[in-house]
Image: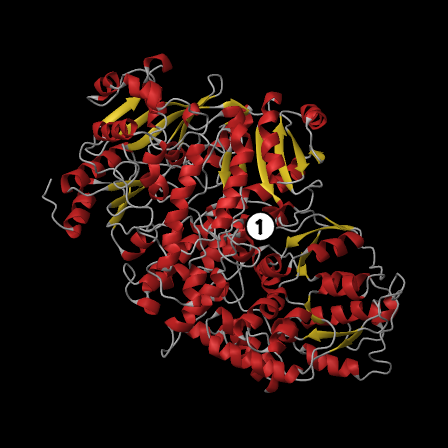
Amino acid sequence: MDAVTAPGDLERTLRANVRGEVDFGAAARALVTMDASNYRRVPLGVVAPRDADDVAAALAVCAAAGTPVVPRGGGTSIAGQATGTGVVLDLTRHMDGLLSVDPLGRTAVVQPGLVLDGLREAVRPHGLTFGPDPSTHSRCTLGGMIGNNACGAHSVAWGTTADNVAELAVTTYAGTAHRIGSGWAGAPAGLRELVGRNLAVLRTGMAGGFSRRISGYGGLDALLPERGTGLARAFCGSEGTLGVVTEAVVRLVELPAAPALAVLGYADESAAAEAAAGLLAYGPLTVEGMAEDLVRGAAGLPRGGAWLFVEMPDEGAARALVRAADALDAVVVADPAGQRALWRIREDAAGTATRLPDGTMAWPGWEDCAVPPARLGAYLREFRALLAEHGLRGSPYGHFGEGCVHVRIDFDLVTAPGVARFRAFSEELADLVVAHGGSLSGEHGDGQARAELLPRMYGPEVIALFAAYKDVWDPAGGMNPGTLVRPARLDENLRFAVLPATPFAAEVATCVGVAKCRSTEAGGAGVMCPSYRATGEERHSPRGRARLLHEMLAGEVVTDGWRSREVAEALDLCLGCKGCRSDCPVGVDVAAYKAEFLHHHWAGRVRPASHYLLGGLPAWLRLITALRATRPANAAAGRLPLPGLTRERPLPPLAATPFTRWWRAYEGRPGAGAGVGAGPGPGPGPGDGPGTRVTLWPDTFTEYLAPETGRAAVRVLEGAGLTVGLPGGRVCCGLTYVSTGRLDRARAVLRRTLDALGEVRGPVLVLEPSCAAALRADLPALLPDDPRAHRLAAAVRTFAETLEEYAPHWTPPRLDRPVAGQTHCHQHAVLGDAADRRLRARAGLTGELSGGCCGLAGNFGFEPGHHAVSVACAEERLLPSLRAAGPDTEVLADGFSCRTQIAQLSSGRRARHLAELLAEGLAEGLEEGLPGGM
């Protein structure tokens, strides 16, 4: 092996010895500078080994070079232990296999990069599961769980990860392989002698432990002979400081056939905490607690100011628990869907707790300390008092049955006084936890956040033993240095220190890295994140994009600022669906970040042709219509390639008659605007406001491409007794300018729109969900100082919202047929579809629309290089749902992009707006008064 003296030499040597990918580029390094903690460390490069031999080769090269190594799984660690300054081993790209399952022996053999949910889904048909289940189960890896000794909600029944690991294959820094389980087989040289010399320390210095003593090498006493010399158990929780796990034999547990959830309401958090320990005798699978400052009005909970979520093996056991519990109120949920809805509150808590009700951000750092369950009530009271003493806020929640408390706190981690307060609070809280007999870490490990404080929890003999244990496994000290043993200070390497003091930097920093965007689970109404799900690449996840922007603003790794090629490439496949805005627990909005980046990236330069052609779509279509050139434009679009557009899909044709031209003829008819026209049900009732004027927004898509939707909406609205009008001047939501990052142009268009619109009176109905979302969210963000922008945003309503709010007594026609199709991603993310669901139910339209994104996403699917991803997004949920639909199923899609994607990819299926279906169901008599038909 050649001598390694510089990063370039190291990269070349790794490439020569490792079959997996070796990447020392700026983008690869930027993506792994952070995990889900407050910390940031910049690595030299990233290696994605293909197998254990690759791991050994990479470690040997790094050891020869004296370069540190950090193994990394899903990057969801919250204490900084998945970051490092040397080489990061990405174990998720190739080493993510489930190698075998033994249902009779209830074991599985896994690789470290396997996501927990992948294992759980594979063994579910055998009636089995892996017991530990942290809330990040859809993206955390088995290797990361072993490294942190992860636990999760079911640990009261099934224990920690260490309790569920039988054997480990481990490779040390020098490249030596070990296979360890119980007994001394596979132990590194000197470990047996070390334990023999320290039996008294292991028996006394680590005494008084409880189930959640995770801090330090908290399982080291498993090496005692009376505890079976549990080498694998002791290795769990070592946070990548001893070696790299390349394979694990894990134990599986029986999955309850029909678990039921008892939700118990208590007057306050202390009452819930004090009740938790008393429930353990009833054999619960979980005992989770949270208070009202976290739940924030969530539906389905019983009365109370705090709640315990107690899962029992069956409904009978749950009801027996309720009878025995001294709760203020209770509810038992046996329905799996109902349980999932309630558990979602808990699983999203790590993100929800990060954004306080007033919008202030709260941060990890003291996320998971634990005390014996009997001490939890007293501990929480003192913890709240300590918060108040330091002027800090946080919302505790967590595994109350085991005394483990999660909390995110609104530390100021930017200014010197704020960081000093963070340190002072951390020291005092550590003392409080220890005073209650607790552990600084209850399941996520210490990392950089708490390792410095371990001497407050353990005596000097134990701390010295930890160092000796580390040195036996890793004598050169190359595995994840600065973690657990000889740790970095808790106020070093804070990720915020490198950012400029700008509003955009503050927004980018809100990504805390919990990585819900990396989930691969499909189904439901969720949208996040289509491009990540299509590519499987971290840089195309919202977290990856936020990390790249973070590093762009920092300027250390990504050095060319707003002109960054790495950031541009990562954002290129962002569809602008805004799914992250709603589905990310902290509301990261990558679509808005992309618009801001493109605004700066192309400033003063000639933009891609698609930005001018598709970004300026409203102006081009208005010009074509003014010139009466619709027919030749359609003919040319079908024959001639247009610059900046893909040749893989046709452009939708322009309508012969724009909606506003039709409207002028319609408005001039006798009796126009009277709100007449009886549908199949009664007209406006008391409180409907007979003749309530609705301003129908002529968005670009309805105006030029789908005027039939606007005509249908007029018919339905008037059938519901409402008076319809259009804005008096030329209006535009600015969506296409925003999506292509032409923000100055978008602001100018929006100011002109507000001038043309005048004073807003009554609802403004926007049929196109993407335009409605732009007016409701982007407009006030772009013109924050213009009160007219906020008034218009507040007036915007969807079609279903308008009917529900302003014609509540109108009865829609009964259509009584099944539907399939797509809920527009912007409707899901910004507008909500509850009113649409209720309207469909009232009309007898049955079935669910698919979530996700159609993949066309306005200009995205028409741009070169995007077609494959666009189709992959449609193939995930939308197209399969249409193939499964019967021939009599109506296809619904309120978004023009969704309807276009369906028309082009679904073999003849035609999707329609809900307004069109309802218009068809109205009485024939109304149709006679509409010029031009429907």
The spot of residue 691 in percent (x, y) is: 84, 74
Question: Residue 47 appears in which quarter of the rendering?
Answer: top left
Q: Give above or below for 286 relative to 684.
A: above
Residue 702 is at least partly visible in this image: yes
Quadrant in the picture for the C terminus:
bottom right
Q: Is residue 233 above or below residue 833?
A: above
* Residue at numbered disc 1: 526
Residue 771 pos. (x, y %): 60, 69
As drawn, the residue found furthest toward the bottom would be 627
707 on left or right of 859: right
- Residue 158 appears left or right of 787: left
Instruction: Give residue 112's quadrant in the image.
Output: top left
Quarter holding the N terminus?
top left
Query: Which residue occupies the foreground of this view, 807 or 664?
Result: 807
Q: Is residue 647 visible?
A: no
Residue depicted at 23% across the width and 34% down the height: 56
Mark 1 element type = loop
Q: What residue occupies the far top of the structure in this picture?
A: 226
Q: 910 and 257: which one is in front?
A: 257
Q: Residue at x 57, y 41 (%)?
A: 346
Residue 846 lies, in percent from the top left, at 74, 48
What coloring was used for the rendering?
Answer: secondary structure
| Residue farthest toward the front in the current orientation of the protein | 389
Name which residue lies at 24% across and 52% down: 24
Q: Position of residue 435 (x, y in %)?
A: 43, 33
Q: Amino acid at mark 1?
A: Gly
In the figure, residue 722 lies in which quadrant? bottom right
In the rendered image of this protein, does residue 224 appear above or below residue 705? above
Query: Image point 23% across, 46% down: which residue?
Result: 86
The 10 Å Cα crowd at callout 1, few under 14, some 14 to 19, many 20 or more, is many
